[in-house]
Amino acid sequence: MSATARRPVVIIGAGPVGVTAALLLARHGVRSLLLERHPDVYPLPRAVVVDDEVHRILQSVGVHEEFAAIARPAPGLRLLDARRRVISEFPRSMQGLHGFPQLSMFNQPELERLLRGALARRPECELWSGVEVVSVTESDTPNTDAPDDPTGPVRVTFRRGGSDEEEHLWADAVLGCDGAGSLTRDAIGAAWENLHFQESWRVIDVRTSRPVRTWEGAEQICCPTRPATFMRIGEDRYRWEFRLADDENLEGPGGWERLRELVAPWVDLPASQSDDFEVIRQAQYTFQARLADRWRKGRVFLLGDAAHLTPPFVGQGLCSGLRDANNLTWKLARVLRQGAPEALLDTYERERKPHARHMIRVAVAVGWAMTGGQDRGAAFRRAVVGTVCRIPGVTEAVSRDLSPALAAGPLVRRRPGLAGRGLAGTFCPQPWIRHHGRRARLDDVVRDAFVVLTAVPATAQMTAVTAALGAPTIHVDDLDDDGTLATWLARGRADAVLLRPDRVVMDTVPSGSGHFPDPTAWASLLHTARRTTDARSVSLPRSTAP
């Protein structure tokens, strides 16, 4: 390879987060190179749960129908006591806000195969397997495309196929999707913030044809001495997670008998090992709650487990990583292809970090409900959480809280005292619509652009905003849906909303006002210095207010 090889984006790690980031960048016309140390997809199951927001992200990269064929929708989560009596239930809908089941079980290697297949169909993406990245550094090589650009390219040093020979390439941006032991995190000088949860658990994935006594959702056994998680993943696939003592071994002599005792509440096993109960994988994991103190340095970014680690009790580990990709990629594309200011990239950590912290805290709270922790206050905390969960309305609130609105900021215009402010930072719902005589999901019609959805005739100011952003204006009545969007706008006291490419509401036209009250803050971030090959893109004025 040439020592001067240059790529727009290099992605370190080709797991689900890295591949999804590459596919999202490709939709915005940005080329990327993925570097993966493993020769193929890791064959054993790890993540097993996604929510409807993440299913919508899979729709945006074109694998949602294939994913639906391998996934199993589940009705929710139950907290059970040591005798398996229901303490509380967190229901999940089969049709969520995003147009998909709110909880889906799946086998991660199958999802990764789908994503790799989509990657192979995109000429903008390239994958190099069997490549070990050894360093990521800011380069002294000047940026020949923009000599005055202080950021410059990033140098990535790597080795191929176990070779000792080091090679180099340069990138306009590097995405570190390289997991909990991230080299990229070390490269930007980030450190872990400890969010105070660490326990060692045994994860057991099983395939069996034996009758299994199961609720179709996930079960969390709240017990100080033997907390556990159980869920059915597929037609004949199940997962158990147990917190075991250091001297409890499920392998070797006596391992089968010990496993038999652990799973007895769910399935009856014979005294000797049986072929109709296949243990696909046993692995000891340390469940942790951690957050990187910084997610970006220059054009180097952290995504997924490189940026945050969460206990798995609410199934948000992989979901958080895919949210990272969805939030960052459209912003990076606008900077790389349209010359938007670097400050736009600052909103990635500003928006995603508080959201990730919140999700980790929810997972830790559920962990406490299961175990109470392991200190003197454990029993008290477990009793309090169990009592709170029995209060009417609490479980519904917690379920809603799994996808809270983004905090107010430059790209989320939430203003005190104005109608419509409650919609800012939330996702637009995705109903089935009728568009030009065909039935489609909303995102398949509006694609990856900014878009204004309005329930009133477009005003001159609204039209100016959409023209500046190269965004279509769509009247909700023209979509001929079931009234979902019109009702959503009415409840939010908004005549119109401006949606970002990730379908988050950026700004609103309050009812009766006829205009976006003050678009100057986000206009300055989205102002483009140059046109792209997309004829719809035009420079955004510093202010489009009348």
Image: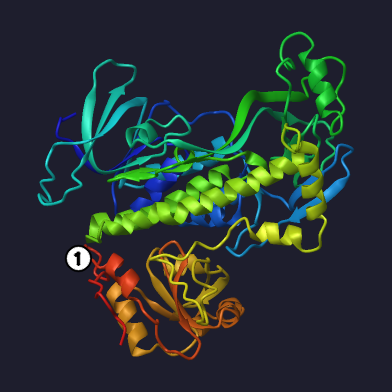
Q: Give the residue type at disc 1.
A: Arg
Using the image as rendered, state which of residue 451 and residue 403 is in the foreground. 403
Q: Is residue 232 above or below residue 539?
A: above
Image coordinates of residue 545 in percent, x first then y, are 31, 83
Image coordinates of residue 333 in percent, x first then y, are 30, 55
Q: Is residue 155 above or below residue 69?
A: above
Q: Residue at x 64, y 62 (%)?
A: 96
Can you say which quadrant of the picture contains the N terminus?
top left
Q: Is residue 290 above or below residue 454?
A: above
Relative to 162, is 70 on the left or the right?
A: right
Q: Residue at x 80, y 33 (%)?
A: 224
Task: Residue 372: name its quadrant.
Answer: top right
Q: Could you classify mark 1 by the number of other residues whose Cα lies within 10 Å: few (under 14), some (14-19), or many (20 or more)?
A: some
Image coordinates of residue 69 in percent, x first then y, are 61, 48
Label 1: state its secondary structure. Answer: loop
Q: Is residue 382 above or below residue 135?
A: below
Label 1 sits on residue: 531
Using the image as rendered, state which of residue 313 and residue 417 is in the foreground. 417
Is residue 61 something that shows in the picture? no
Image coordinates of residue 296 in percent, x first then y, are 35, 45
Q: Residue at x 31, y 75 (%)?
A: 520
Using the image as rendered, state which of residue 388 and residue 333 is in the foreground. 388
Q: How many marks?
A: 1
Can you say which quadrant of the picture contains the C terminus?
bottom left
Task: Residue 286: name its quadrant.
Answer: top right
Q: Which residue is at the far top?
A: 253
